[in-house]
Image (spheres, rainbow, N blue to C red):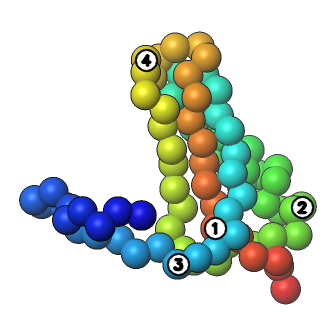
Amino acid sequence: RSDAQPPEGMAELHVPAVTWAIFPCVGPAAEAQCKGWQRVFTEWLPTSGYELTGAPELEWYDIGDTDAPDYKSEIWLPVRTAG
């Protein structure tokens, strides 16, 4: 959370408090994120007992070389118990 005004040309987005499922991705960012999203939706979500809440899905990227083999990023999904 920040009390700073967004830079010109950008807007503030309020994200409600939710439970987040966080998936680490390691490797070159483009490839790791693509594989991460694919695994989340084909392997994890169908069998997890969770469903998406409709809140924004987020990606987090570390500082550094996004093409490095050990580069770290994350996928954050807003979830609730299915049903």
Reading the image, the residue beneath label 4 is 65
Res 30 visible? no
Reading the image, the residue beneath label 1 is 78
Query: How many residues crowd mark 4 within 10 Å: few (<14), some (14–19), many (20+)?
Result: few
Q: Earlier in the sequence, mark 1 or mark 2?
A: 2
Reading the image, the residue beneath label 2 is 47
Q: Residue 63: x and y, percent?
A: 43, 28
Q: Are marks 4 and 3 in contact (CB under 8 Å)?
A: no
Residue 61 in the image: above or below residue 21: above
Query: How many residues crowd mark 1 within 10 Å: few (<14), some (14–19), many (20+)?
Result: many
Q: Residue 40: x and y, percent?
A: 72, 50
Which is more toward the observer, 42 or 12? 12
Between circles 3 and 1, the one closer to the viewer is 3
Q: Hey, which quadrant is residue 13 in on the image? A: bottom left
SS assignment at label 4: loop
Question: How far apart in space, not on screen, are marks 4 and 3 (Cα)?
Answer: 31 Å
Question: How far apart in space, not on screen, are marks 3 and 1 (Cα)?
Answer: 10 Å
Question: How far apart in space, not on screen, are marks 3 and 2 (Cα)?
Answer: 25 Å
Reading the image, the residue beneath label 3 is 16
Res 64 visible? yes
Side of 1 where 56 appears, left or right:
right
